[in-house]
């Protein structure tokens, strides 16, 4: 690996910070999601309802513990730390004219703290944290007006942190909503609450287009503020393998990859690919895509491709499906060659090498693995956590990443594992789906002292960074 490789870890504001109302923060979509459980989805309430349990309101109270937490990351030798800026700290409702100074000041302190330890902040603007007010009043990204609100937010952040942050990303995992039947993903990605009579598929394509335009405009604004900015996109990469070598399965896997990754085509190339234009026409989706939008997309291509990698998928062609349309809810099958986590996420280290090669073949753009990690139940034994399963997962994935760089020649800026510290799960709201190298004393019921504790994986990752990935 190159000497300046950005080893580190990643979190998102809503999953760590807490401080729900601190410094004038407004309500975000994450603040109205209740605690789910393994296999039990989170519910969305209409505002904050007394008596309900909202794990993100306190999270791990990073808002008050960040100095201690950054110091622990520095102890592991982190070169980079990825987090997001909670949109609602800066614009509590989302449609204000001017940003909230207290919110901006918090991130000044956080980024200064990183820099003090020689840690490069890597910052996502929108990570499942849309202001709830924009959802309720404007319909989220079903409404074109949200483009301008996002631009204002991006501009405020770029201006304020222009000398503190170089690496940015616009929308986290913008393509989770490729699973357009999932109300959870539509809300997290687009701030959309489904209503009676909605065509969720068409709605998703329209919202995604608006977000892609918002992202492109932000890229242009950012480059004008500081030409040295590196502004990337962020894609959830789960390669979709064919279940067999039956030609229909092979083609279906390729068509499914198009439907999950066309978002990256637009971010990187600056236009909707031909296969998507044909698809919109066939479906009769008369999308609101203006000439101005097309110009904006071309003018705001990303500098690098950030992506998360946790698992791979597998697909089988079901008759009748003459157009090979992809439905993530029904078309995926289990892959008998890989094991899965306790949450059913299929563990596939080679898939990471495959993903790096697939993206690089397609775009020849520098990449950044901005999430990769293992959610698992941890056990305290004599006050220690021997998380060999997490070390095994990370070791196997890092080994494949190193091969992709050293043997295959892909360009990779860095690797921020998910997550350096235990946090609230995005999909289930659990604390006990733990990713951390640092344990946090807090359980699903919200009980615990919030004390931080180094796990075995902490010492292991420290060694990996110190040897630049040589000693796994
Ligand atoms: P949790 C689905 C598939 C891959 C990654 O997820 C995903 C999701 C949606 O949950 O999300 C990302 O916490 C996301 C993070 C999230 C992390 O993966 O559900 O960017 O916010 O915490 C892990 O186990």
Image (cartoon, helix red, strand yellow):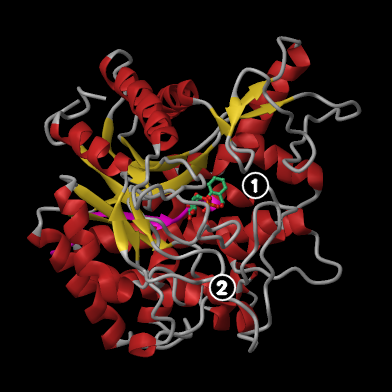
Q: Position of residue 344 (x, y in %)?
A: 64, 38
102 relative position to 78: left or right: right
Q: Which residue is mark 2?
A: 29
Task: Looking at the picture, tell me which residue is in the foreground, 323 or 28.
Answer: 28
| Residue farthest toward the front in the current orientation of the protein | 382
- Of 73 and 85, which appears nearest the observer? 73
Instruction: For residue 9, say whether it is visible.
Output: yes
The quadrant where residue 101 appears: bottom left
Q: Are marks 2 and 1 in contact (CB under 8 Å)?
A: no
State the image coordinates of residue 93 (x, y, percent, origin top left): 48, 85
Whether residue 308 appears in magenta in the rendering, the answer is no
Q: Secondary structure at mark 2?
A: helix
Q: Is the C-beta of the residue carrying label 1 under 8 Å from the nearest atom of ligand 1? A: no
| Residue positioned 67% across, 32% down in the render | 256
- Mark 1, residue position: 178
Q: Residue at x 39, y 33 (%)?
A: 388
Q: Earlier in the sequence, mark 2 or mark 1?
A: 2
For label 2, count other residues whose C-alpha is less than 10 Å away and answer few (under 14), some (14-19) or many (20+). many
Q: Is mark 2 within 8 Å of ligand 1?
A: no
**Part of the protein shown in magenta:** 163-174
* Residue at image point 41% right, 37% down: 390
Q: Position of residue 126 (x, y in %)?
A: 44, 63
């Amino acid at each position: 690996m190159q000497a300046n490789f950005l080893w580190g870890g990643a979190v998102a504001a809503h999953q760590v910070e807490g401080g729900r109302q601190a410094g004038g923060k407004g309500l975000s979509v994450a603040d109205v999601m209740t605690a789910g459980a393994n296999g039990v989805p989170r519910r969305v309430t209409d505002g904050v309802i007394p008596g309900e349990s909202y794990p993100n309101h306190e999270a791990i109270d990073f808002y008050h513990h960040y100095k201690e937490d950054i110091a622990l990351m520095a102890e592991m030798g982190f070169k980079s730390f990825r987090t997001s800026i909670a949109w609602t700290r800066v614009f509590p409702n989302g449609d204000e004219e001017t940003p909230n100074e207290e919110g901006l000041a918090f991130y000044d302190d956080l980024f200064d703290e990183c820099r003090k330890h020689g840690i490069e902040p890597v910052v996502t603007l929108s990570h499942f944290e849309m202001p709830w007010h924009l959802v309720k009043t404007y319909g989220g990204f079903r409404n074109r007006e949200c483009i301008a609100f996002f631009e204002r937010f991006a501009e405020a952040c770029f201006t304020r942190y222009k000398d503190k942050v170089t690496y940015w990303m616009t929308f986290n995992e913008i393509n989770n909503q490729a699973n357009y039947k999932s109300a959870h993903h539509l809300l997290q990605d687009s701030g959309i609450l489904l209503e009676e009579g909605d065509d969720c598929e068409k709605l998703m394509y329209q919202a995604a287009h608006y977000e892609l335009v918002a992202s492109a405009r932000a890229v242009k604004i950012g480059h004008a503020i500081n030409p040295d900015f590196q502004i990337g996109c962020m894609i959830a990469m789960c390669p979709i393998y064919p279940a067999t070598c039956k030609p229909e399965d092979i083609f279906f896997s390729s068509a499914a990859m198009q439907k999950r990754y066309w978002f990256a085509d637009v971010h990187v190339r600056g236009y909707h690919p031909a296969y998507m234009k044909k698809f919109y026409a066939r479906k009769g989706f008369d999308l609101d895509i203006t000439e101005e939008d097309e110009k904006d997309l071309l003018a705001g291509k990303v500098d690098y491709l950030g992506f998360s990698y946790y698992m791979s998928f597998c697909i089988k062609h079901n008759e009748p499906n003459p157009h090979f349309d992809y439905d993530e809810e029904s078309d995926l099958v289990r892959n008998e060659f890989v094991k899965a986590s306790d949450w059913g996420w299929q563990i596939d280290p080679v898939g990471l090498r495959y993903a790096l090669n697939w993206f690089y073949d397609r775009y020849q753009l520098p990449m950044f693995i901005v999430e990769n990690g293992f959610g698992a139940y941890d056990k305290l034994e004599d006050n220690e956590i021997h998380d060999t399963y997490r070390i095994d997962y990370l070791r196997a994935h890092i080994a494949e990443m190193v091969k992709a760089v050293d043997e295959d020649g892909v360009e990779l800026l860095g690797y921020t594992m998910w997550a350096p510290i235990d946090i609230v799960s995005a999909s289930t709201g659990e604390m006990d789906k733990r990713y951390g190298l640092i344990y946090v004393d807090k359980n699903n019921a919200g009980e615990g002292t919030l004390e931080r504790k180094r796990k075995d994986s902490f010492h292991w990752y420290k060694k990996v960074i110190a040897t630049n990935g040589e000693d796994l």
